[in-house]
Amino acid sequence: MKLIDGKATAEAIKAEIAATVEQMVAEGRKRPHLAAILVGHDGGSETYVANKVKACERCGFRSTLIRFEDTVEETQLLEAIARLNADADVDGFIVQLPLPRHISEQRVIQAIDYRKDVDGFHPVNVGRMSIGLPCFLPATPAGIVELLGRHGIPTKGAECVVLGRSNIVGKPVAQLLMQKHNPGDCTVTVCHSATRDLKEHTRRADIIIAALGQPGFVTADMVKPGAVIIDVGTTRVPDPSRKSGFRLCGDVDFENVAPICSWITPVPGGVGPMTICSLMQNTLLAARHEIYD
């Protein structure tokens, strides 16, 4: 069994991005500028946005954080999005999800200029991705594909089972892995809460991508020897022994599944760092106008 070290991979990519940015600046071009809108004080979102700010510093980007209380009206949020859309100095921006229930996530996502949608959630980017056109790819799926590629994990013709059908991970990673490129060319099965005989699917899989948000869901009896396991889960589980009072738990029973695998991502330190790294890659693409003019 080998660990897929997302943290080390992400650091290498950020170093590559930083070198490119310094070259851009030396040529007289402006530094890439990423903005983020954060609504409320969700602990996970706060941590994630803070890590994005640090990643911007590491990559040599400018960053802006715009905060709203969770009582903000949807119209106020849409106005802030319109201002960022119109700000020529901002190359890309994100609205951190989830949002409070009184705000429509879909209205917010569709209000973002797709040319600045570095999260890759706008319908234009989703549609372009689905037919293989250049676009901003959603960060977590792009990070997963990057991990597979950089670790030389063969995907052509592989049986891949995706557990979960969310718009953020499950659906887009399935789309990416079935396309004709490397990594890709997989035979993809998407499983979810209505799937019958789930274990029959997972036991055939050469690659399992677990994106359910259910700690320890994937057990050893669901995995064939030599499979590659990508664990996307990051659920906070209470742990009084930790200073924070919690620990992060993946969707895979790591202790019992890892000995069976050829490769596996840890939690934390696997997919998570790559998600932020993919956001940095999209922002660089936006700043260089490599996707849209």
Image: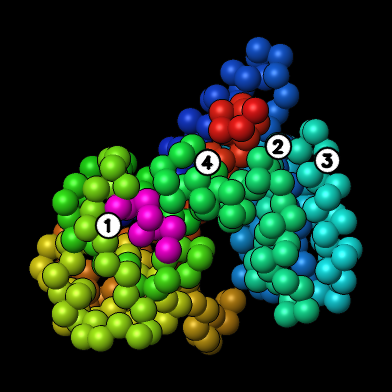
- Percent x, y for residue 39? 77, 67
Q: Do the residues labelled 3 and 1 touch (CB within 8 Å)?
A: no
Q: Quick one: label 2, few (<14), some, or many (20+) residues within 10 Å?
A: many
Q: Quick one: label 3, few (<14), some, or many (20+) residues within 10 Å?
A: few
Identify the element where label 2 is drawn. Answer: loop
On screen, 225 above or below 274? Answer: below
Q: In which quarter of the image is residue 162?
A: bottom left
Q: In which quarter of the image is residue 47?
A: bottom right
Answer whether residue 177 is magenta in the image.
Answer: yes
Q: Which residue is drawn at 79% across and 33% down?
A: 89
On screen, 146 above or below 271? Answer: above
Q: Quick one: label 4, few (<14), some, or many (20+) residues within 10 Å?
A: many
Q: In which quarter of the image is residue 220?
A: bottom left
Residue 206 at least partly seen: yes
Residue position for label 4: 135
Q: Are marks 4 and 3 in contact (CB under 8 Å)?
A: no
Residue position for label 3: 86
Q: What's the magenta region?
A: 171-178
